[in-house]
Amino acid sequence: MTAVESDARIRQDVLDELRHDVRIDASNITVDVHSGVVRLSGTVPTYFQKVTAGHTAERIKGVRGVANELNVTLVAPWTDQEIAATVRANLARDVRISNPGQITVGVENGVVTLTGTVPTYTQKSDAADDAWRAPGVVDVVNALAVAPPISRADAEIAADVRDTLARDPTIDAANIAVTVANGTVYLRGTVPTYYQAQQAGNDAWGVPGVVDVVNELGVSF
């Protein structure tokens, strides 16, 4: 199969998946693929749909990367004050967020910016999830810092990351090298799919004591 044929197949698979996803209005989404990298452009009515479309494209076989350039065109505008209040309420009632009072929510022209600290990357991701689900949001800037409540040796963190990757049935970790310096995890090597590269980064973030993850994994079919 030539590269052009492969890109054409990936493009059709992404389009089919987007059109079949009931969570997404794909009528104004354009999909372009070059050397396995998917570019999503056009418009969607909510930021939730933008994020969902990007995640959908990541799961398609043969994808090496996703550039999500979708713009959010709101059906009904919300004021920045209304959006901020909704995001704060979402954070306050979310059982996954241990201390929502340490998260500051700023909104300007529909763009939500989250600042402050959380104890884990999982909570950082969950906070962003609470933000982009709020009506009226056009983008989310997640500037939350991860401040683990415990300090762990780099060797312990590295061992736990390797164990986590090895246990994940969705990842072929045979060619993943893990190193840790001052709590920052570095992932290098190759995996068979772009989805696995993203998932490996998520797995690493879930290990206690991790303060940052530098994901340098490549895709090798």
Image (cartoon, rainbow, N blue to C red):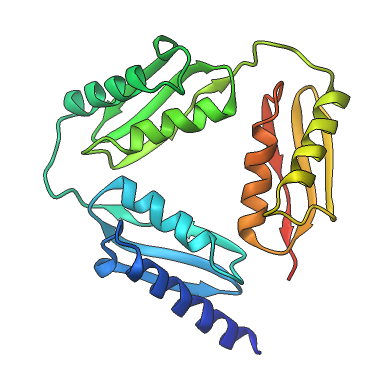
Give left or right: position of 70 versus 36: left
Q: Position of residue 136 (x, y in %)?
A: 21, 39
Residue depicted at x 75% and y 67%? 220
Question: Relative to residue 26, is residue 150 depicted above or below?
Answer: above
Rendered-image quadrant of the C terminus: bottom right
Nearest the viewer among 172 and 100 is: 172
For the image shown, how many numbered marks are present on the structure?
Answer: 0
Nearest the viewer among 82 and 99 is: 99
Residue depicted at x 85% and y 24%? 156
Which of the 4 image quarters holds residue 35?
bottom right
Nearest the viewer among 107 and 126 is: 126
Q: Position of residue 134 (x, y in %)?
A: 27, 35
Question: Relative to residue 17, is residue 58 depicted above or below?
Answer: above
Residue depicted at x 80% and y 48%? 188
Does the rendering let one see residue 68? no
Which of the 4 image quarters holds residue 140?
top left
